[in-house]
Image (spheres, rainbow, N blue to C red):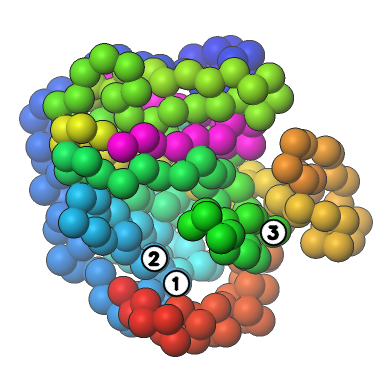
Amino acid sequence: MGSQLREEGHAYLPGVFETSFLRALERECDEMAARHYRVENIDRHAAYLSDNTATRTSHAMMISAGPSPLPTVSHQGLPALEQFLSFHDAVLGMLLGQEVPAWSRSMLNWQTYLSGSKPVTEHFDGEYLDYRKDADGGFTLHEGLLPRLVLVLTLSNENEGERQGTVLRDTGTGRELSPPSRPGDVLVFDNVRMRHSVPTLEKPRRMAGLRSFDFKAVHFARTQASCRPGAAYRQMPEGLVSEDVDAVAVHQEFLRERWAKVREAQKAEGALF
């Protein structure tokens, strides 16, 4: 898997988890929402705004195996979720050649797509430190922390044929691909090299994903003006990225200096949850 990730930018792993585990993880994700999805956790940036429409519901929260210097919510007593996080950390550690520390948070995201769900526009996953909304409903990222990889587990899916779920595009070559998305399948992809989207789905699908914003995350800057002093950057199609930046320190600075204004703007737009 490691060589495929490095060479092709993604790895597709069919049937990794059994049905009993998938149902347990579904229940535990719903339990996480019941426990933690509230204004005070969004205010402190441990939970993120939900995308809740008639055809798609999405939740996201930050979790870690041990105490973290950044905001998290607890997943204590949820064994399937603990196993899922351990699997993610093992894959990330294999890719990076270094054990993932217990303090490293991962964003747990789970989504339910119903028939005719609105598409998810192409994007990088990450902590968006500075972005601008576009007229077409999308957005342009100006500065952010990009996790090195994203791991997606299909919990259930009634769609068949092509484009059953996540669509990947290699930003270097322009090649587009859509791996299968059957229950128990895992898709892992390089979040710096690949952009991803989800088309309108004709039938229901449910997934859960993890990605680390802290350990070895890269700093993205659209222009030199957003680059961090002393860090070496390399060019990519949409801007510049650096592996030299301390992601935890950048996030702490964001929470200290910018998050309150971002949250005030969200509330002014009516986005409490």
Question: Residue 118, how many percent across, how many down?
Answer: 31, 46
Query: Label 3 to label 2, Cα distance in Å?
Result: 18 Å
Query: In the rendered image, which quarter is residue 202 located in?
Result: top left
Q: Amino acid at mark 3?
A: Glu
Q: Nearer the viewer, mark 3 or mark 1?
A: 3
105 and 221: which is toward the camera:
221
Q: Residues within 10 Å of mark 3 (few under 14, many from 20)?
A: many
125 and 53: which is toward the camera:
53
Q: Are marks 1 and 2 in contact (CB under 8 Å)?
A: yes
Query: In the rendered image, which quarter is residue 179 located in?
Result: top left
Magenta stretch holds residue 255: no
Q: Quadrant of the C terminus?
A: bottom left
Query: Label 1 to label 2, Cα distance in Å?
Result: 6 Å
Q: Secondary structure at mark 3?
A: strand
Residue at screen point 26% across, 15% down: 161
Q: Which residue is mark 2?
A: 48
Q: Is residue 161 above or below residue 214?
A: above
Mark number displayed over residue 143: 3
13 and 123: which is toward the camera:
123
Q: Is residue 257 above or below residue 18?
A: below
Q: Which residue is mark 1?
A: 45
Q: Which residues are magenta?
A: 185-200
Residue at screen point 49% across, 86% down: 264
Q: Amino acid at mark 2?
A: Tyr
